[in-house]
Amino acid sequence: MKRYKRVAEAVLERTIIDLLKPIAENRKKTADWTSAYQWVFNPDNGSILRFELCCEVLDVNPDQLREKLKEACSSRINALRVLCKSRKMDINDISDVEGLEELLQEGKETSVDFIVDSLRRGSVTPQE
């Protein structure tokens, strides 16, 4: 089962980066962004490895994780919060965001861990 967890984490990690990096960097959304968005938010996308399956392996409710990802996609600061905490952004490249230091006060972790842990800390519960 550990192997499946590592695969699920890796797939979700790549998806989170593809979803949030263009938003955090204030750049145009790419084909990778579109593909990641469809994989997360369109359950009928025809992919063999489904978002729901990755969530199930990690014991996370897929609908609640979708909401958390939607929130992270909603603004540059939310995207930066996830990517900076997960070491997926170079802080030196970001000078135009007020309060960036506050984003970095907590410890570093993978973006999957950051989002899943925030799901578990908040009002969101693991999948039952």
Image (cartoon, rainbow, N blue to C red):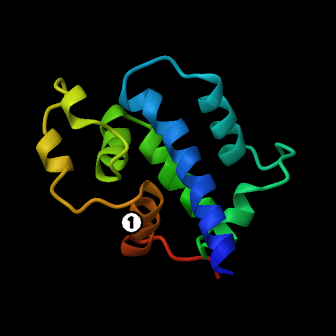
Kindly identify the residue that appears in the image at 69 percent across and 81 percent down. 1
The local crowd at label 1, few if under 14, some if 14 to 19, many if 20 or more residues have their Cα within 10 Å, is some
Among the 4 quarters of the image, the one containing residue 96: top left
Residue 17 at x, y = what percent?
49, 42
Kindly identify the residue that appears in the image at 43 percent across and 45 percent down. 72
Among the 4 quarters of the image, the one containing residue 110: bottom left
Residue 74 at x, y = what percent?
43, 37
Kindly identify the residue that appears in the image at 83 percent across and 47 percent down. 47
Amino acid carrying mark 1 in the image: Ser
Decide: is 97 above or below 3: above
Q: Label 1: which residue?
A: 118
- Between residues 23 and 68, which one lies in front from this camera angle? 23
Tell me the element at label 1: helix
Kindly identify the residue that appears in the image at 45 percent across and 46 percent down. 71
- Between residues 12 and 60, which one lies in front from this camera angle? 12
Outermost residue, front side = 3
- Between residues 22 and 74, which one lies in front from this camera angle? 22
Count of numbered labels shown in the rendering: 1
- The C terminus: image quadrant: bottom right
Residue 60 at x, y = what percent?
58, 71
Residue 54 at x, y = what percent?
68, 64
Among the 4 quarters of the image, the one containing residue 91: top left
Decide: is 73 above or below 63: above
Asked whether, in this view, residue 86 is left or right of residue 91, the answer is right
Asked whether, in this view, residue 53 is left or right of residue 64, the answer is right
Decide: is 31 above or below 123: above
Asked whether, in this view, residue 27 is left or right of residue 101, the answer is right
